[in-house]
Amino acid sequence: MSLSNSQIRHLRSLAHSLKPVVMIGQHGLRESVLEEIGIALDFHELIKIKVSAGDRDERDQIIGNIIGETGAELVQRIGNMAVIFRRNPKKPRILLP
């Protein structure tokens, strides 16, 4: 699913007030963390992740791995925060324009 510019703007506005649901630290991305991200995406659809590991390249790689493994879309990335979205096909919660 590819998001349009208006959909991305809408999701950014919704994500502004969110707190990070998952925090990735010095141990990096583990299978258990990916499972938690999947569960959070199923329930919330739009989540904020804080990646406090390594330098910019390592954070980009971790976020890329999360996107690839979960099938989510990257909405926004600022510093060590990333906002991702994945529609729940059974019970959609967020209406996109």
Image (cartoon, rainbow, N blue to C red):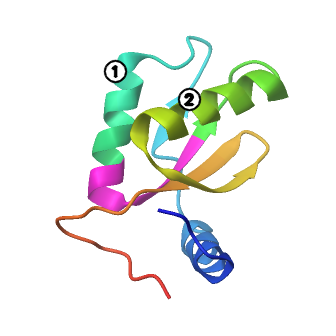
Tell me: residue 9, above or below residue 84.
below
Toward the viewer: 21 or 92? 92
Q: How would you rate the neighbour count of disc 1 (Cα within 10 Å): few for under 14, some for 14-19, many for 20 or more? A: few
- Residue 91 location (% of width, % of height): 19, 69
- Magenta segment, which residues? 41-49
Q: Nearer the viewer, residue 96 or 36?
A: 96
Question: Which residue is disc 2 drawn over?
Answer: 65
Task: Give the residue displayed 62% in from the left and 72% down from the top.
Answer: 8
Rendered image: mark on residue 67: none
Left or right: residue 36 compared with residue 80: left
The answer for how far apart the CA atoms under marks 2 and 1 are is 14 Å
Question: Residue 87: x percent and y percent?
Answer: 36, 63
Q: Do the residues under discs 2 and 1 have CB atoms within 8 angstroms?
A: no
Q: Position of residue 48 (x, y in %)?
A: 54, 51
Up the image or down, 11 lies above or below 46; here it is below
Residue 18 rendering spot, x and y as whole percentages: 53, 62
Q: Residue 32, labelled with which disc?
A: 1
Eye-nearest disc, 2 or 1: 2
Question: Looking at the image, is 81 positioned above or below residue 35?
Answer: below
Residue 62 occupies quadrant? top right
Identify the residue shown where x is 51% and y is 20%. 29
Q: Residues within 10 Å of mark 2 (few under 14, many from 20)?
A: some
| Residue sitting farthest toward the front | 1
Q: In the image, is residue 12 above or below residue 50?
A: below
Find out whether residue 47 is within the magenta segment: yes
- Local SS, label 2: helix
